[in-house]
Image (cartoon, grey):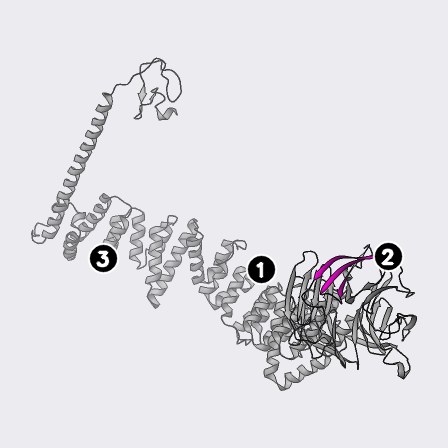
Amino acid sequence: MAFRAFTQIRVYEKQVASKEKDKSSIQCIECFDKHVYIGTRDATVQHLILPSGDQIKAREGRVRKLGSSNQVLQLRAVPLFNHLLVLWDRSITALNMFSLEPVPSLKKIQHVSLFEVCSSSLDQKATSVEMVTSSSRRKVIQIHVVGVDRWEVVKEVPLLQEPVALAVDGASLCIATSDRYLLYDVTTGRSQELFRHTHSRQRVFVTPAGPGEFLLNGPELLGMFVMTTGICQRPPLQWPQEVLAARVCFPYILTLQPQVLSVHSVLDQRHKQTVSLSGAKGLLSTSDGVVVFTDRDIFSLHLVPFEEQICTLVRLERVEEALILLDGVKGHHLLESHEELQNSITCLAGFVHYYRQGFPEAKDLFIKGELDPREIIRLYPDTQSGLCEDFKSQLDQANKARDLQVLWQEDSDTFHHYLLFLGDFLRAVRGTEQCLECSKEVDCALLRLYVELGETENLQQLVSSPNECRLDDCVPFLERHNRFFALGSLYQSHGNQKDALKAWVKIVDGRHKDPTCSDVYGHIVWTLSQLHDSDVVWNFADWTLQNNQEIGVHIFSRRPPDAPLETQDTLSFLEKYPLALLLYLEFLIHELKSEEERHHSRLALAYVTQTLQEEKETDSMETRGKLQHLLWESKFLDVSVVHERIKSTTLHVEKAILLSRTGEHTQALQVLVHQERDLQAAQAFCCRAAQNRDSQFSQTLLLTLLQIYLSSDDLTNAAVDLLNDNPVAFTAEKVVPLLPESWSIQLLSQFLVGSLRATRHQRRMASLEKALSQVELMRHKVIWMQTTKTKIRLDKEQRCTVCQRDFAEPQFACSLQGEMMHTRCNDPSSL
């Protein structure tokens, strides 16, 4: 089946005797509506009426013999006045279009070689039309105004060469001479040379190509489109040799050669059709095509309806051409169901690219053509089950679907590329208007596709976000492919939290195998921590903490503010999980800043229990450090409760801290020295207890520690070291009376030197501070004396700068800027 833009019909065949053939052959024709006028070689004009309805041949009308010789060169109809203008014997004669009788009021225009009527002036509302004639005697062109009963020359344009062909568009003339083409503006008189040519007179022509545009037979076998402004907006058309004439019947250009008529597209410059016409002499544009004539015959070429042309191109799989044609005629012709037709053809073009594996182009065309995604889904063997039974395809793709079945079974690599395209296309249309009616099918197809391709990340993103997957279709599919983690996420996205957690629990317990996921337990904990449904949380809390208390406690400690659990219920539940309880109490105190005494005391007791337990197993320094920090820092701790718990244990440092908090500093130091037997801890205790206290308190603690050392014979060295290491912290006059008489000066030399230096330094600093204070006092006295000696004048009408009242008393105050005010107004307490 070949593509045809035009259909050919022979509408007229001239029947004459053989000896008269040369004399009566057709020389030119003119058309208006259904009327055709023939100009013959023997000076005859004949009227024909084209066929309509079931008629095939044209009906012959009147005939007018103009003379005995000379051929009719041109015919032009002026339907506004019912005139038929005839160029014969170098003269223009006006005939009536229907009777072919001469118009008596219009005398012949003599000495004319060719002429044209301005088609844009043939408006039904016009009172006259313009006609351009070329003189056969002089190198001039004349502009005529033609009325119903008169014509006259209104302008004359001189030329350097004789015109060979011309065309008129409004005020613009396109003129062809023997070696060049020219543009001439009748209104402005401006002339512009376009380009030269080397054609013979028979091959030179210029014809209107549309509003404001001409088509010319240019150089190098090019059809040139030239605007009335002198520029080219279309690329030139490469056409064959020996072109006799050309006409534009949008969107096609028809070129006439001696034996054929060629049809090219203006839109894509491609050759579309060839019509065999032996002996053709000329062609003429009509409203729905062109008319071609030979010496004896007239053929009508009608434009095939555009819908039929487009469908033919699609059937020939020339879908790009179909789209170009559809877009090109959109603004020129009104097509029925244009939008539906365009979408259908766009989608078919997409399928052509699709089956050629031109996937990017196919995707763009499917989206542009608003293709129902189910038309693609149904082609794939493993995704068809996700389609609704009531879906009916609007496209004939059955054979192509079978091709994909073969690829699925025989060429897995190629089929893999088709699967990748499906995912790319469905992701592009998902959530758009194109997908509104089939969102369930799209999501189900994507789920199956991700499983098939092993795209775990995309699968998880799909099932974790809001989706329209049908559970009755997707759940069995995920179970068959061991995608239990995705199954749980699918349940969760559909609001079924309990089933989701059950699916994940089975993976952790080993009842289900899913190699595509890791840290399922952590995901379960995070999910439980975010749930608002407290019943589901309590249902899975035991299982979570039995697996890992340290991580499992996050379901209570990492909850969002809008989904809290009762604190007391949580503490009661965690009684059987000591580590989780401790971590939860830390969360309450350190993050929630709880000020409840029971929480602080309970955390301290939990630290004590864990410390005692860890002493038997591992190093307990970390937990013990947390306990000591809590005992020092907590303002809400019940000291008596905690002391009661640890007084019988070996946690002597903690005992000392608690005794210190009750003011029993001496007893606390004795515990550290005699029970803990850690002298460094005792000295560190003094420093820690003295934080944020005055130096006197620190000296008292160290002096107490010294006395404890001196009371024990085996701690003499510790006492000496304490004095020598902290000479500044002790006062010599308080320490010396406490020391044994047997101690030598040499033993205490370091302490004595340091203490004396510190004492002297303190005295000198005190003396310096006193001197500086005296200087400051003296400076203020000088300022006061200078101020009291200054004279201030108080006028009778002077007013207070604060209250704006007169001074009624002799007392007043004066600011440093010299502003005077009442003494009561100067008092800040009165403001």
Answer whether residue 627 is magenta in the image. Answer: no
Q: Position of residue 205 (x, y in %)?
A: 72, 71
In the picture of the structure, the residue carrying the numbered disc 2 is 149
Q: Nearer the viewer, residue 569 or 563?
A: 563
Taking the image as shown, residue 169 lies to the left or right of residue 695, namely right
| Secondary structure beneath label 1 | helix
In the picture of the structure, the residue carrying the numbered disc 1 is 535
Label located before the other in sequence (3 or 1): 1
Tell me which amino acid carries mark 3.
Gln
Q: Nearer the viewer, residue 35 or 473?
A: 35
Q: Position of residue 243 (x, y in %)?
A: 72, 77
Taking the image as shown, residue 40 lies to the left or right of residue 709, namely right
Residue 689 seen in the current view:
yes
Label annotation for residue 712: none
Q: Position of residue 568 (x, y in %)?
A: 49, 54
Q: Nearer the viewer, residue 516 or 443?
A: 443
